[in-house]
Image: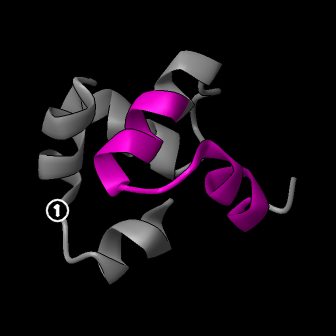
Amino acid sequence: MRSLRKEKKISQETLAYLAEIDRSHMGKIERGERNVTVLNVIKIARALGCRPSELFAQAGL
């Protein structure tokens, strides 16, 4: 997720805003400190302009 976010030149704060997820929670998701729900994966993918499957693929899943 971080690499896609940086590739699109979006700050973590902006991504959190676009995905309607609390900024601190977004940081924890990126650092792997929190498990992410499927709903939040969908929100993050939409905010990044990609498919949820791309996020899973980048995570090696």
Is-magenta flag for residue 50? yes
> Is residue 37 in view?
no
Q: Which residue is painted at 44% across and 70% down in the image?
A: 4
Left or right, 9 with reference to 7: left
Left or right, 21 with reference to 46: left
Q: Which residue is painted at 84% across and 62% down in the image?
A: 60
- Dot 1 surroundings within 10 Å: few (below 14), some, or many (20 or more)? few
Nearest the viewer among 41 and 28 is: 41
Nearest the viewer among 59 and 31 is: 59
**Across the whole image, how many numbered discs are drawn on residues?**
1
Residue range in magenta is: 42-59
In the rendered image, residue 19, in percent from the top left (x then y), is placed at: 27, 33
Q: Quadrant of residue 22?
A: top left
> Is residue 22 in view?
yes
Note whether 61 is above or below 11 in the view shown.
above
Is-magenta flag for residue 51? yes
Residue position for label 1: 11
Left or right, 33 with reference to 50: right
Note whether 36 is above or below 46 in the view shown.
above
Task: Name, please, the residue furthest toward the bottom.
Answer: 7
Q: Which residue is painted at 35% across and 55% down in the image?
A: 48
Q: Quadrant of residue 17?
A: top left
- Give the amino acid type for the residue marked by disc 1 in the picture: Ser
In the rendered image, residue 33, in percent from the top left (x then y), is placed at: 58, 37
**Dominant SS in magenta:** helix
In the rendered image, residue 41, in percent from the top left (x then y), is placed at: 54, 33
Left or right, 8 with reference to 52: left
Task: Identify the element where label 1 is drawn.
Answer: loop
Q: Quadrant of residue 54?
A: bottom right
Q: Which residue is painted at 22% across and 24% down in the image?
A: 20
In the rendered image, residue 9, in percent from the top left (x then y), is placed at: 20, 77
